[in-house]
Image (cartoon, grey):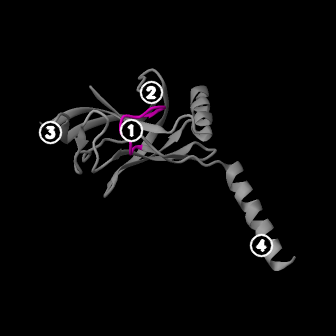
Amino acid sequence: MDRLFFETKIAADDAGAIRGIAWKFGAPDRIGDVIEPGAFKGAVLPLPMLFGHDMGDPVGSWEAATEKADGLHVEGKLLVNDVARAREVFALVKAGAVKGLSIGFITKKAAALPGGGRSIKALELFEVSLVTVPMHPGARVTSAKSAVDALRLAAAINRATTALTGG
């Protein structure tokens, strides 16, 4: 089993919905591996959402995995209403302590790159983990919002509108 770690941006709401970029195309990870566009074709959903690649620590599931021009984007849900550990991980994500994503896969087709690393053309993706230190500098959680943040934003907009309209 291969494991690659990526820094990611994660987005989540109070219901546990979460989004991120699990692999960034066009740049190698910290050990020199590059996954080529098309390699994620055939990913079987849903995928387990683990914490730190620990198969005994599932915290949710990824319901969508989409290759876009810049990389593999994932969307899923932390099981915050059903799993205590998911609530803990969600708190860490919202606080910014956990902002990385990392993929677990089996390489199906790869070629060595000059200077080290591999060009991976086909793989079997079997999990995406939330991690503190990702292997790929471009993999990150892209959204970690909460209802509280949305309410604060709405209040700020209302205050600004009142100030601008004099009312």
The numbered mark, 3 or 2, whose residue comes first in the sequence reads 2
The numbered mark, 2 or 1, whose residue comes first in the sequence reads 1
The numbered mark, 1 or 4, whose residue comes first in the sequence reads 1
Q: In the image, what residue type sits under mark 2?
A: Gly
Q: Position of residue 114 (x, y in %)?
A: 13, 38
The numbered mark, 2 or 4, whose residue comes first in the sequence reads 2
Q: At x 35% / y 52%, what residue is drawn?
A: 66
Q: In the image, what residue type sits under mark 4?
A: Thr
Q: At x 65% / y 48%, what residue is drawn?
A: 146
Q: At x 41% / y 23%, what residue is drawn?
A: 55
Q: Which residue is mark 1?
A: 6
Q: Can residue 47 be seen?
A: no
Q: Which residue is mark 4?
A: 161
Q: Which residue is mark 3?
A: 113
Mark 3 to mark 1 CA distance (whole Å): 20 Å
Q: Marks 2 and 1: which is nearer the front?
A: 1
Find the residue positioned furthest to the right: 167
Do callouts 2 and 1 mark residues in contact (Cβ within 8 Å)? Answer: no
The residue segment tinted magenta is 128-139
Majority SS type along the magenta span: loop
Q: Marks 3 and 1: which is nearer the front?
A: 3
For label 1, the SS is strand
Mark 1 to mark 4 CA distance (whole Å): 40 Å
Do callouts 3 and 2 mark residues in contact (Cβ within 8 Å)? Answer: no
Q: Which residue is mark 2?
A: 52
Q: Is residue 135 magenta?
A: yes
